[in-house]
Amino acid sequence: MDEYPDSALLLLQDIAFPQILRGKERADYALLYTQACDKNYMTPVNDSLIRIAVDYYGASKSMDASLSYFYLGCVNWNKGSNVEAIYAFLKSLDVFPSHSENRLFMQIHIYLGECYNWEGLYQDAKEHYFLAYQEALHRNDTLCIIRCVD
């Protein structure tokens, strides 16, 4: 997904009748399809698909739950619902697995910084940018370091 998101999207689009999927398969499809669209700069402005994943994974403290809420935040951000986006990003942090080493942690804080900055809550934005920056330093992620200080 990270290296070839366009291929991932094509594979997901080739699934015949995704509407017949149920349970975990349906939630995985909803999450992966939304993720592939986002990575191809096609994030939808309708949250009905990602809500399938949120409804399925939302109660767990897992990477799938965190990703589901993160992409719900992205969808809300893209449709201009900043308060809903902030709630989803905060929920994504809440269900993020505590011992996980994942780039998602930085992304959540960057997006929260963007949302708070957009709302004029500059101190809150600064705190989240700083948390993302600290994590980027820890991971030696130069691309994220640049984004945090930009």
Image (cartoon, rainbow, N blue to C red):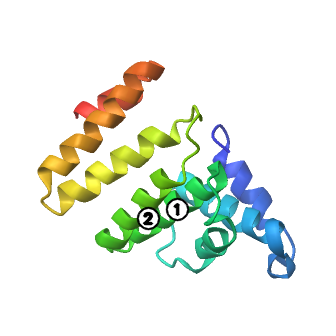
Please say if 59 is above or below 93. Answer: below
Between the C-alphas of marks 1 and 2, the distance is 5 Å
The residue that disc 2 covers is 88
Between residue 149 and residue 113, name the one nearer to us. 113
Q: Is residue 107 left or right of residue 25?
A: left
> For mark 1, does the 10 Å Cα neighbourhood hold few (<14), some (14 to 19), or many (20 or more) residues?
many
Q: Amino acid at mark 2?
A: Ala
Residue 72 in the image, given as x and y percentages of width and height:
50, 66
Please say if 47 is above or below 42. Answer: below
SS for dot 2: helix
Count of numbered circles in the view: 2
Please say if 17 is above or below 78. Answer: below
Quadrant assignment for the N terminus:
top right
Tags 1 and 2 touching, CB below 8 Å: yes
Between residue 29 and residue 17, name the one nearer to us. 29
Residue 25 in the image, given as x and y percentages of width and height:
83, 66
Q: Residue at x 59, y 34 (%)?
A: 99
SS for dot 1: helix
Q: Is residue 61 left or right of residue 21?
A: left
The mark that comes first in sequence, 1 or 2, is: 1
Q: Residue at x 69, y 58 (%)?
A: 32
Residue 52 in the image, given as x and y percentages of width and height:
66, 75
Between residue 46 and residue 140, name the one nearer to us. 140
Please say if 31 is above or below 84. Answer: above
Res. 40 in view:
no
> For mark 2, does the 10 Å Cα neighbourhood hold few (<14), some (14 to 19), or many (20 or more) residues?
many
Q: Amino acid at mark 1?
A: Tyr
Residue 69's label in the rendered image is: 1
Q: In terms of image quadrants, where is residue 147?
A: top left
